[in-house]
Image (tube, grey):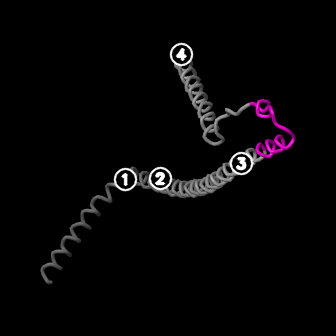
Amino acid sequence: MNRCKDMVTNLRSKSNQMASAFNMSNFANRDSLLGPETKPDTMSRTIGLDNSGLIGLQRQIMKEQDEGLEKLEETLVSTKHIALAVSEELDLHTTLIDDLGQHVDVTDSHLQRVQKNMGILNKHINGGWSCMCMPLAVIGIVVLLVLIYLLIKYL
């Protein structure tokens, strides 16, 4: 029980560390993508402007917003391409894993067949075949040695 509790405690601490690292990286990424959020107050920017100045300020703000949206669009397009590449890679890995699973199944069936044959052979050997096979094997080896000797002698 203590071992399990220790493992749960370790996992929780690792989870908290990963969560804090993830949250900190989100803020850094936002700043690098969109820039820092230090913008002057809108009311202070409008002080002393007439109607045409306000319209110009509105156009400038809209232009800044458009630029921000363009940066956001570029980021989204980039993210989309990355997501498509990851999807293709996952499809490839899924196919490879499926093929590997099929190969494992085929190998498993071959292994079962060989084990079955080995069991049959083992039964035959235990049933007295070994006494008969040994002399036959010795005679076969002797015949092969005589044939090799004759081949070498006459060639």
> At which x and y percent is residue 131?
31, 55
Give SS at disc 2: helix
Secondary element under disc 3, as helix, strand or loop, is: helix
User: Between disc 1 and disc 4, whose residue precedes?
Assistant: 4
Disc 3 versus disc 4: nearer the observer: 3
Residue 16's spot in the image, x, y percent?
A: 59, 25
Residue bearing mark 4: 2
Q: Give whichever of 17, 120 is nearer the camera.
A: 17
Mark 4, Cα crowd under 10 Å, few <14 / some 14-19 / many 20+, is: few
Residue pictured at 63% horizontal, 33% vertical: 27
Residue at the disc numbered 3: 67
Front label number (3 vs 2): 3
Task: Report, in whole angstroms, how far the alpha carbon at label 1 lies from the one at label 3.
Answer: 91 Å
Residue appearing at x 66%, y 41% in the figure: 34
Task: Give yes or no for residue 47 being in the magenta stretch.
Answer: yes
Badge 1 element: helix
Mark 3 vs mark 2, CA separation in Å? 70 Å
At which x and y percent is residue 125? 38, 53
Q: Which residue is mark 1?
A: 128
User: Compared to 85, does 21 lie above or below?
Assistant: above
Mark closer to the observer (4, 2): 4
**Helix, strand or loop for disc 4:** helix
Residue 29 in the image, given as x and y percentages of width and height: 61, 38
Q: Amino acid at mark 1?
A: Gly
